[in-house]
Image (cartoon, rainbow, N blue to C red):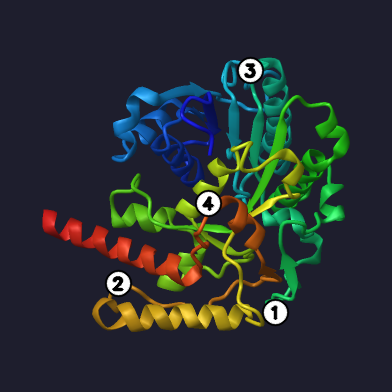
Amino acid sequence: MPSGNGGVIAITGANGAIGYYSALHALRNGCRVRCIVRRDSAIATIKSGPSIQEFDDRIEYAVVPDNTVPGAYDDALNGVRYVVHVAGVWPMPGYHPDRDIYDPFVKGMENILSAAEKSGTVKRIVFTQAGAGLVCPDEGDTLGTEMNNVLDEYAKVNDRSAAFRPPLKSPHHAYCGAKAYCMTHLSSPQTRANLPFSIIQIIPGTVIGPSELITSAAQAKRQMDRMSLALLFNGMQPRYAFGFVHVLDCARVHVEALDEEKVPEERVPDWFIAAATSKEGITAQKLWKEVGEMVEMEFGSVYQDVFCVGKSNWPVNMPFRVHSRLTEEMLMGERRFRGLEECVREVARWYIELIERESLRK
């Protein structure tokens, strides 16, 4: 990753899971970090993290309330060398498709590129993308769970979604369309040829893992990823899954991708895949049942009053088999991505620890 004297790393969405742990990974490796958030209250959230407090002398903060406004990031990127653009919007049902989802992604991307050019110092930008850009919402829930398609570093953007433009008919259309458009735009040789910095794109799977920013079991359950909720509490059936990644592995990939020596521009794939490689021949049903059985075996007898295992609650659409070996080789060193079973086991243990801590305080 970039050396400690290699300049400031700006991270948008630094109060979210990927952003927070990306900041922490960079700080632990000697870098200076500028955390960019949308609200002043988010700064307090970041500062509450126990691990990040020891690096207070190497953290800066910037507030960008509306990333769709022209010039939104100009001050925030002034003087930085690297950018990790994580900030985004989840497609909640009540959100306006254009104003609340599509514009923040597309205009936010445009404003990041513009501010980086104006800075005169930015050398590389990492953009967080999504598997949603690889599918079209007009296909409905017909993608299946056989995992016959390969999600690797050269998977293709869905052309139909990339052509979506406002006004859009649903939050789901806005999310898929915005991601597909941004991924296509940033991959374009015409876009890259005119920029004085390199671009990296990362497609994470569902990000799973404990968070030190969460201090109660109730809060953990409210903010838990949808896969863990489905498996541990038989929560709402996930609609899509594009692989799975531990939050610390995901953060590592985002920061290590900034290293211009380790990852020279000529070796950059279309996108890095931050998700564990799937076993050959496995289906969503089989994978889900295996992880559910692990939860029952390791936690069921003692914690049956805590967990309600959703062993048959696999995602409705899980069409891709992940193959992330290139990403692992270039960015993970000797490590491998932790898979769904390892991630869910850690979340279960963390949740139990939160309950036990609360019990001791009573």
| Left or right of 42, for residue 162 | right
Percent x, y of residue 237: 55, 70
Q: Amino acid at mark 1?
A: Glu
Q: Please say if the residues under marks 2 and 1 sit with CB atoms less than 8 Å apart.
A: no
Helix, strand or loop for disc 2: loop
Marks 4 and 3, Cα distance to the nearest angstrom?
Answer: 27 Å
Q: Which mark, by number, is residue 250?
A: 4
Relative vertical location of residue 239 with respect to residue 294 in this rendering, above or below: above
Q: Residue 31 at what x, y percent from top left?
A: 45, 30
Disc 3: which residue: 74
Q: Which residue is mark 1?
A: 146
- Secondary structure under badge 1? loop
Q: Which tag, 4 or 3, sits closer to the chain's start?
A: 3
Residue to which mark 2 is pinned: 306
Amino acid carrying mark 2 in the image: Val
Question: What residue appears at the point 55 percent right and 43 percent down from the top-left corner?
Answer: 256
Choose the circle earlier in sequence order: 1 or 3: 3
Q: Position of residue 32 (x, y in %)?
A: 45, 27
Residue 29 in view here = yes
Sequence order check: which comes first, mark 1 or mark 4?
Answer: 1
Mark 3 neighbour class, 10 Å CA radius: few under 14, some 14 to 19, many 20 or more:
some
Which of discs 1 and 4 lies nearer the camera? The answer is 4
Which mark sits nearer the N-terminus, 2 or 1? 1
Q: Earlier in the sequence, mark 2 or mark 4?
A: 4
Image position of 79 with respect to 220: above or below:
above
